[in-house]
Amino acid sequence: MRTSLVIANWKLNGDLALVKEMATHFAGLLKDTTTTVVVCPPAVYLKAAEIALAPVNIKVGAQNCAAHTDGAFTGEISAQMMRECGASYVLVGHSERRAIFGESDDVLAEKIARVQESELTPVFCVGETLEEREADAVESVIEAQLNAGLAQADFSNLVIAYEPVWAIGTGKTASPEQAQEVHAMIRRWLRDKAPEQADTLQILYGGSVKADNADTLFNQPDIDGGLVGGASLSPEQFDAICKAA
Ligand code: PEP
C-alpha cells in the first residue's frame, strides 16, 4: 500500500561532477522500479541536478528552506525558489539544522507551512539523542517533535523521517528492531492525528544507512525507505541502497 522512497542528503558535499556521475551511473537503472529516488544536493546545484537527473528518473530536493516567503533575509532561499529550481521535496528539521543552526520547533512548523504552500513535499525529520535514549525518553521526545512541528501540517503531502541523532554520520545504525519500534510508534501517533493518512504516509529511516544494512532495515513493516547521508555520495553505494528498497 506504500511505495518506497530513498532520499540522498549530500549536506555540504558534492559538486557538478558528482551530479554528472550520478546521472551516468543511474542511466536506465530506475526504469522498472516503483521506488522513488530523490537527491538533495546543495541548493546552488538544484537546477543542474534536475536537468541531469530527471532523464534517469531521479527527482531533486532541497536540504532546507527559509521560514519566510520573501523580504530582507540575506542568504535565505524560499521554498518557492527551490521549486523554481526543480525541487520536489524539502528536508525540514534535520538534526544538524536543529542542533547547529538552532532551529526551534516554531521555526520548523513555519518551514513546513512554507513548503506545503509551495506545493512541495516536506520531509520532516525527528530523532532522539543518545542521552534521551538512555533516559528512556525516546517516545516522549519524538512525540513532542511531531506535535510541535506538524501542528498545522497537511498530512496528505508529507513524509516523516526518523533519524536517531546518535546514528547520523557515526557509523552506528539503529538495529532493525529499534528502528521498527519507533516507526510503529510514529504510525500509532498518525492514527490518532491523521487517521486517513496513517497507512499511506511514508516513514523513512536515516542514520548510517549503508549498502550492507539497508536490506534488513527496509524489510521492517513500518520502514518505507531511507534518508541517506554519507553513503549517498557514492553512486555505487547509493544504487545498492535504492535496490534494497
Ligand atoms: C543524514 O544526514 O540524514 C544521515 C542520515 O546521514 P548518514 O547517513 O551519514 O548517517
Image: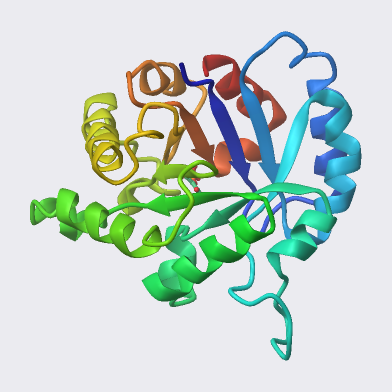
Task: Please indicate whether residue 234 sits to the left or right of residue 194 in the image.
Answer: right
Check the image and name the residue furthest to the left: 135
| Residue 167 image position (x, y, % from top left) | 35, 45
- At x 30%, y 40%, the residue is 190
Q: Describe residue 4's horizontal placement relative to residue 105 as left or right.
A: right
Rendered view: 199 above or below 152: above
Which of the 4 quarters of the picture holds residue 70?
bottom right
Q: Quadrant of residue 152?
A: bottom left
Residue 221, visible in the rendered structure: yes
Q: Position of residue 176 (x, y in %)?
A: 29, 25
Residue occupying the far front of the picture:
196
Dividing the picture into quarters, in which one does residue 22 lie?
A: top right
Q: Nearer the viewer, residue 59 or 132?
A: 59
Is 108 on the left-hand or right-hand side of 9? left
Q: Is residue 104 visible?
A: no
**Residue found farthest to the bottom:** 72
How many numbered discs, if any? 0
Residue 89 coordinates in the image, percent (x, y): 65, 47
Residue at the image point whose x is 68% and y is 51% from the top: 119
* Residue positioned 40% across, 41% down in the render: 171
Q: Is residue 100 above or below residue 189?
A: below
Q: Position of residue 208 (x, y in %)?
A: 44, 39
